[in-house]
Amino acid sequence: MSGVHAPHAPLSEGPLRDGLRTPSRQRRRLPRGDRHEELVRGAMRVLRSEGNPDNWVAAVTSEADAAKGTFYVYFPSWEAMLATVRQRLVDAAGAPIRSALARSEPLEPWAVLADACSSFIDVVLEYGRHHALIFHGTAPTESMADPNSAERLLTALIERGVAEGSLGQVDVGAAARLLLAAVHAAADAVLAGGERRRWTDACLVLARGYLGPPVSARE
């Protein structure tokens, strides 16, 4: 009828774009798994930004176009979200190791370690100063029981190399933990402005010094 208009869908505050909050229509109802994924991806986008929100949860739900209370349906705390993001990034950085371990031919451990080191440096550079929240903060640490934890992946790589004779007989657990610390230190140094090749090479030289094959295997 003339003069009568259908009501608009209610507006809500949309994601933050260039410092301005854009209006969006009523929030979509998503399956539980989809909403969880949108929150995680929203957190990753916020953490990649240069901003420093007063309220990280509010920033993430705004970016994911979700109600603030929705966050706590899926995550008990911001630290739990950081732990989830960290595992995503560890999974990505560990791809070269998982790929090598899945192949039947003998490992080339130094090439695999170089790729993994480069991959982790990429992750740290992508998240810039906020990588400290993810990797140096109070988020729950990954469990060695998780086969995709960084330490467990390195342990599996070293065990395989020792079994195949390409690496020396070492304390595998200690070697994995020390190597992980060295890779992380190299990434932090590159983020602080260090020359990437220099720090990657130094990390690999340290690894070769401890993990190298027995003298008889080198001859």
Image: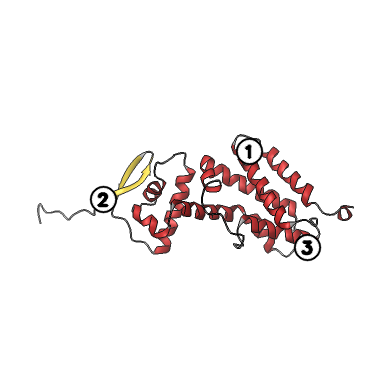
15 versus 161 height, above or below: above
Q: Quadrant of residue 100?
A: bottom right
Q: How many marks?
A: 3
The residue nearer to you, when weighing 83 against 33, is 83
Quadrant where the N terminus sits is bottom left
Residue that mark 3 sits on: 163
Q: Amino acid at mark 1?
A: Ala
Percent across and percent down for residue 202 are 72, 41
Q: Are marks 3 and 2 in contact (CB under 8 Å)?
A: no
Q: Amino acid at mark 3?
A: Ala
SS of the residue under disc 3: helix
Mark 3 vs mark 2, foreground winner is 3
**Residue that lies at the very extreme toward the left in this rendered image:** 2
Horizontal side of residue 45 vs 167, given as left or right: left
Distance from Cα at disc 3 to Cα at disc 1: 33 Å
Q: Are marks 3 and 1 in contact (CB under 8 Å)?
A: no
Residue that mark 1 sits on: 189
SS of the residue under disc 1: helix
SS of the residue under disc 2: loop
At label 3, counting other C-alpha atoms closer than 10 Å, the crowd grade (few under 14, some 14-19, many 20 or more) is few
Lower position in the chain sequence, tag 3 or tag 1: 3
Which residue appears at 74% of the width and 54% of the height?
Answer: 109
Q: For residue 11, which numbered disc appears in the image?
A: 2
Which residue appears at 61% of the width and 45% of the height?
Answer: 121
At label 2, counting other C-alpha atoms closer than 10 Å, the crowd grade (few under 14, some 14-19, many 20 or more) is few
The residue nearer to you, when weighing 125 against 129, is 129
Q: Amino acid at mark 2?
A: Leu
Percent across and percent down for residue 27 are 31, 55
